[in-house]
Image (cartoon, rainbow, N blue to C red):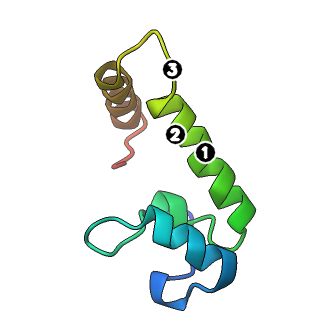
């Protein structure tokens, strides 16, 4: 498994802190899949915008169908996300 240095929520400053405040869950945590971009805030912003487009944007598939596809792909890839 790869190891990527991530900046924790309590150490974030500047643009990263602003992004974290937007992405933080109700339990006070930013998902690791987003935090891997913490050393490069523009890539974090782009990753999240891409995610929003794919999952929440206009599509011939419903949100539930898209989530089901994501679950199957993650299971196939042995990914816990």
Tell me if 1 is positioned left or right of 64 in this view: right
What secondary structure is found at the residue carrying circle 2? helix
Task: State the separation of the CA atoms marked 3 and 2.
Answer: 10 Å
Q: Does any portion of residue 5 appear in the rendered image?
A: no
Task: Name the residue beneath numbered marker 3.
Answer: 58
Residue lying furthest top in this view? 60
Q: Seen in the image, is 22 located left or right of residue 64?
A: right
Label 1's element? helix
The answer to whether residue 56 is above or below residue 24 is above
Q: Residue 16, image x and y in percent?
A: 63, 75
Q: Are marks 1 and 2 in contact (CB under 8 Å)?
A: yes
Give the crowd class for mark 2: few <14, some 14-19, many >=20 residues within 10 Å.
Answer: few
Please name the residue that numbered disc 1 is placed on: 49
Task: Choose top left, top right, bottom left or bottom right for residue 6.
Answer: bottom right
Q: Residues within 10 Å of mark 1 (few under 14, many from 20)?
A: few
On the question of residue 75 being in view, the answer is yes
Residue at position x 36%, y 72% from top? 29
Residue at position x 56%, y 33% from top?
53
């Amino acid at each position: 498994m790869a190891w990527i240095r991530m900046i924790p929520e309590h150490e974030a400053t500047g643009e990263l802190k602003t992004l974290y405040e937007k992405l933080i869950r109700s339990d006070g945590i930013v998902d690791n899949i987003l935090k891997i971009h913490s050393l490069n805030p523009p890539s974090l912003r782009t990753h999240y915008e891409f995610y929003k487009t794919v999952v929440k944007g206009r599509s011939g598939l419903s949100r539930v169908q898209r989530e089901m596809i994501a679950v199957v792909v993650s299971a196939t890839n042995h990914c816990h996300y």
